[in-house]
Image: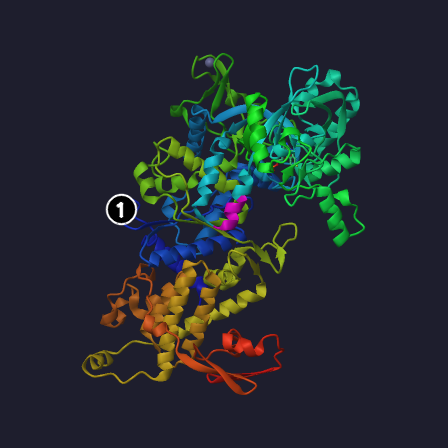
Amino acid sequence: MIYNPQEIEPKWQKIWEKKKVYRADLKSARKPFYNLMMFPYPSAEGLHVGNMYAFVHSDTFGRFMRLKGFDVFEPIGLDGFGIHSENYAIKVGEHISDVSKRTEKHFYEQLHMIGNQFDWSRTLETYKPEYYKWTQWIFVQMFKKGLAYQAESYVNWCPSCKTVLSDEQVVSGRCERCDTVVEKKLMKQWFFKITDYAERLLKNLEWINWSERTKLSQRNWIGKSEGATIKFPIPNFQSPIEVFTTRLDTIFGCTYCVLSPEHKLIQELKPQIKNWDEVEKYIAQAQKKSEMERTELAKEKTGIELKGVKAINPFNNQEIPVFVADYVLVHYGTGAVMAVPGHDERDFEFAKKYGLPIVEVIKSKDGKSSITRAVAKGEEEDLSSSPEEEAFVEDGVLINSGEYNGSSSKDARQKLADWLEKNEIGGKKIHYKLRDWCVSRQRYWGPPIPMIFCEICDWQPVPEKDLPVLLPETKDYLPRADGLSPLARNEKFWKTKCPKCGGPARRETDVSDTFLDSSWYFFRYPSVEFDDKIFDKERTKKWLPVDMYIGGQEHAVLHLLYSRFMTMFFKDLGMIDFEEPYKRFFAHGLLIREGAKMSKSKGNIVNPDEYIKKYGADSIRMYLMFLGDVSQGGDWRDSGINGMFRFVNRVWKLSSKTELPSMEAKVKKRTEFSSPPQAKTQNLKNLVHKTIKKVTNDLEGLKFNTAVAAMMILVNGFEKEEKIDQEDFEAFLKLLSPFAPHISEELWGKLGHSQRDKSLFHPSLRSGKESIFKEKWPEYDPKLVKEKMITLIIQINGKVRDKIEAEADISEERAKELALSSEKIKKWTGGKEIKKVIFVKNKLINIVI
Ligand code: ANZ
Ligand code: ZN
């Protein structure tokens, strides 16, 4: 019989589904294990092979946990609301609700085809009212707790997508989706106060079991800075310039102040500013630049002095000039800085360019001032560079700082902050880069924000009994450049009554951000059947936090931070008693193709369907997992699939070699001493057990590729045998089954475990369960995995100099490595060139020097 995945794969998928092999008993499972993967967003007709890359790794881990005896719950759904999906529909020129019906069907078909152990009875789609009812409910709770507010603010505006983007959706100053340079626009938006949770979000990173890389991204995103604020009075003007600095110790070196172009004070100071035209022009130009362009160190700094305006350094009462410059950002700190060109690189560059004084106030601890240091350095290393070409940016000892001279930077920061606090012109301050989460979008395809505005009662949340606020079906849904939401053009939608006073009122016409949909979906899966609550307490207690979450590193800040915030919020509402959603998060790398990033514009996207049709899902799964360390990503090469397909075929052929222990042999075994196994068979037994050990350890450590490699070695071993002991082959099939579930199940059945053919097989095997996925993961015999050891003689120029214990059949390379690391040998070889190495397998290694 030939291997025909097109026949066996759909067959098993149907049987598994019918027999509910993958349905966890959500109520009474004894060892629950929640195996989660990031649900896909349909921004194209179908699943991308990159999704599949993530999903098969996650599924293989989940199946491994199942075989280890856990009640694994592995759900899937669609993150179908949002701009990705809407833009796709616009591109293909169809209505988004039609497209989403079609993509839902196709995505689910594909997700069936890859053979994951999904619980198909618990799918969810974020665009269904039964789901987004609860997304809206969350919004209402946020509002009630004072964590949702509306504010006018500069937001990231993508002129191409015609919508607001969150900071996380802006990558290097460009729109994450369409790569257009993002602009700043002043608009009214809804925000969630995630900044209230900044410290908690940061603190928990100390203990959660996540990849270090991911934690670091979160830490940087939250960006905690400890510093101080200082008020610099402006003569003849009511309000001061307030700055945020992390280097209060440099205050005596402050020779000017800088405001960001969007700073409110600039407009207020207009009557005093003598060069207003120039300033106004500069501000307009800055507005066109992306944040990235403005802050990049390499870019030349620009700015304009506000002529006629001065500020006073409160510590020495010196009058200093005030500038507007676009390298200062409005959202960070106070949107204004005290510039210290002697000790800050950007300020230094700026001061040089505009001829501003540079005052040195910190010298290094070794007693030399920074200038002399720089001279010394210049002499030694690079005579051409002029000595003051750099600012001394490190901590040190204060000079030119009045009564603070001689203090260390650290002490000075404390003393100076105390003085500020005493005089009520500033003090210590912690700043976070993290900003509140802008959750409103001026688009159509999302949950309408459940708020109602009444002239008398102000903003009122939609009463919970009236949720969901249904997204109206409309043909007129395209975004427009005016930034007005599509729903605002739909009077029937927005005209309503105030829930408080009953008077005429207006619904919010913005929808919420997709990241809100996905920030809580994993709470819903175990509770999809409850339509009177967002999730069931008992269920959640049993299944959450998620045990294992595998997904892309690209979501390290976007989605993971929001879902952590949401979990903390649920805890604060008293709904759950944990505050971190994922016990373990593992980030997979990116799948590329023939060395290049897959993208539609390059036309090199791999459509998994074609390959599955041709080779079967098992081969594709195995191939994806063989590509390399999953944390590093993989390079898909068409030529590689064939190789994997051949391997799977070899596995198929092996099954005809398996030998059932005959009744006589069994009886014989019990009554007589069996003859000692032949060396060859014994080696194979060892190999089987070594492979069990290797695959087990590798799966625990998420090293899928090396596990596949180990199974390949075992298959080579099997092929050398005329007959394979069924027990050994069964152990192998169990190892293989998480990776290639269909073929493993089929061959398992052929060994006599399938219910249908039970009668055909030996009675001793009839007790076997009907699915390999109801079996137990094989265990290895520690005695059989021990390496046989030999004594390796080490010679130097033919004379025996040492003897070491080494594994039998050790390679020359490894023997050389061991020999050269021996202390005795090091004495002989130290510093000498090795001319030649003579290696006699399992006996000696001779090093010629
Ligand atoms: C004076 C000073 C002297 C500074 C010195 C640094 C070195 P982190 O560590 O990233 O928090 N800064 C403050 N607000 C800013 C804004 N809105 N846009 C651009 N830069 C801003 O950075 C804090 C430092 O960044 C602050 O400390 C301030 O410059 C600058 F020798 O103040 B510093
Ligand atoms: Zn009202």
| Residue 475 seen anywhere in this rendered image of the structure | no
Residue 786, quarter of the rendered image: bottom left
Residue nearest the observer in this picture, 552 or 211: 211
Magenta residues, dominant SS class: helix
Residue 143, quarter of the rendered image: top left
Residue nearest the observer in this picture, 161 or 776: 776
| Magenta residues (range) | 211-217
Q: Circle 1 sits on which residue?
A: 28
Left or right: 61, with 847 as reference point: left
Quick one: SS at disc 1? loop
Q: Is residue 405 magenta?
A: no
Q: Position of residue 530 (x, y in %)?
A: 34, 36
Q: Position of residue 560 (x, y in %)?
A: 48, 42
Residue 84, quarter of the rendered image: top right
Q: Position of residue 413 (x, y in %)?
A: 58, 33
Callout 1, which amino acid?
A: Ser
Name the residue furthest bottom. Answer: 798
Question: Is 663 situated above or below 635?
Answer: below
Question: Is 478 situated above or below 675?
Answer: above
Left or right: 678, with 793 as reference point: left
Assign the N terminus to one quadrant of the image.
bottom left
